[in-house]
Image (tube, grey):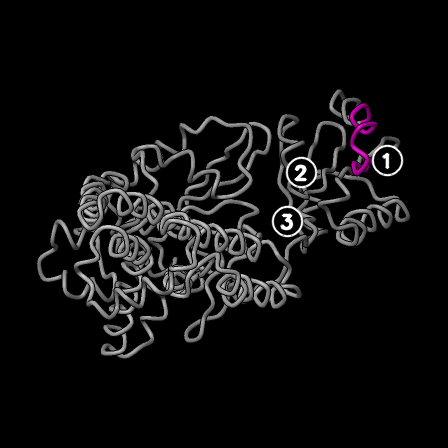
Amino acid sequence: MNIVKELYKNKEHMIDLQIKEVPFNNDKIYVINIQSVSSSNLTNEYILEYFSKLNISKKRFINIKKDILKSIPSISYIVINEKDIYDYLFEGFTILIYKDNILAFETKANLDRSISEPTSEPTVKGPKDSFNENYNINIGLIRKRIKNKNLYIDEIILGTKTNTRISIMYLNDIVDKKLLNDVKNKIKNIKTDKILDTYYIKELIKNENKTLFPTIKSTEKPDTISKVLTEGKICILSENSNSVLIIPTFFLDFFYNQEDNYQKKFFTYFVLFIRLLAFFITIFAPAIYLSLITYDQQMLPTDLLISFSNQRANVPFPALIEAFILMFTFEILYEADALTPSSRGTSLSVLGALILGDAAVSAGIVSPIMVIVVAITAISSIFFAYHDFQSFIRLYRYFLMLLASVFGIIGILFGFLLIITKLCNLKSFGKPFLINIAPLIQNKNKKSLIIQNTNKGDI
């Protein structure tokens, strides 16, 4: 067969391609797999050993498909065409070629890590399992939570070079069909060489808003995905990715934590208030300090103003430069900590504390009050673990600092109105980004601030 000759030719450049010729019935059976993604044990136990016994017994095939179906019940096989051989080989299947018959046996090797606790979303209460890089396991983690025939999974192959399987998952009886068609069309229209993770998809489909604010959220927690599916949202899974995208995503979703479902209502209200307060502190605290120390000193009590002036007496830089020095030092430490092995994280934290604290103040480079402001700002940002949300906060923080240093409190108010206006104009796949805030959802608004209990009518 021509395909066998082609495979032998490609074997020179594919060192993990294995081709074994098994003599049988005065002919040859070709057993082919890719060693790096196939299990040698499964191939030997269910295929090669089987044909070895047939050779010994001198048995002849009457019908190869029926004979294999009857004799190898413990392994599934698929009848395929020549054009599909490479696709199945790269998926970990073993290909059997006998005359004009081509069968693919599932002999995938286990190349994935086991189910573990989430790393980017630590969990105290509730389930502690998380997605991993195994496509089928990820689907199974959702299936075991939603045992419903209306849970639909539509598969699409993306990436002309990678041929990555992408799943669009939704509950068919409650999903907004217009939203579903919009999502499917955007994904089908993706033209790219490679899709290696769900983040590749996110960057290619979020083109309706030119904004720094994230309008698509991802998570590695199956219980979160199961919850949003029951609210009528759509989730996107990808091979080799431990993150699942949630569509659409609204502003309040970034203040919601899955553990809120396992808390008492009063405590949930309290934590929500803390998160909202932390959001405003981490964005506005440096800007407010700069405006008060630079332009609007009359707003401070005299004693406090004198104290600030005494602290800054020996600092050789203007307040804006002083703030930027500390903020950029924090940014460097933040990025370094994210890339540092956990065994070295403690050393980095101690070094950072010395630089930002005692050493910088003793050297007269920054004032103690500026260290306090930056520390409060950094601590407040820890509430928001989602990376894209952190990026929005960090960039707008500098924007407001510049406005405050030039226009004072008026500049901060202008920046605040600009952010609110931008958020009001954002849409996530045609849905208002500030839904449940503006526009209000009747009889749902109060509850939505605590538990995102939207349904098809809401989104």
- Find residue 165 and report its horizontal and vertical position in percent: 52, 40
Any part of residue 459 in sight: no
Q: Which residue is mark 1?
A: 21
- Spatial CA distance of label 1 from label 3 is 22 Å
Any part of residue 304 in sight: yes
Q: Which residue is mark 2?
A: 90
Q: Quadrant of residue 26?
A: top right
Q: Residues within 10 Å of mark 2 (few under 14, many from 20)?
A: some
Q: Are marks 3 and 2 in contact (CB under 8 Å)?
A: no
- Find residue 103 and report its horizontal and vertical position in percent: 68, 37
Q: Nearer the viewer, mark 1 or mark 2?
A: 2
Q: Quadrant of residue 351?
A: bottom right
Q: Residues within 10 Å of mark 1 (few under 14, many from 20)?
A: few
- Spatial CA distance of label 3 from label 2 is 17 Å
- Find residue 274 and report its horizontal and vertical position in percent: 28, 69
- Spatial CA distance of label 1 from label 2 is 20 Å
In the rendered structure, the answer to whether residue 326 lies left or right of residue 397 reads right
Q: Is residue 15 magenta?
A: yes
Residue in view at x 27 percent, y 78 percent: 267
434 or 219: nearer the viewer: 434
Q: Nearer the viewer, mark 3 or mark 2?
A: 2
Q: Which residue is mark 3?
A: 76
Q: Earlier in the sequence, mark 1 or mark 3?
A: 1
Q: Earlier in the sequence, mark 1 or mark 2?
A: 1
In the rendered structure, the answer to whether residue 458 lies left or right of residue 280 reads left
Task: Work out whether 14 lies above or below 424.
Answer: above
Disc 2 marks a residue whose amino acid type is: Phe
Residue in view at x 31 percent, y 68 percent: 307
Magenta segment: 8-25
84 or 301: nearer the viewer: 301
Disc 1 marks a residue whose amino acid type is: Glu
Label 1 element class: strand
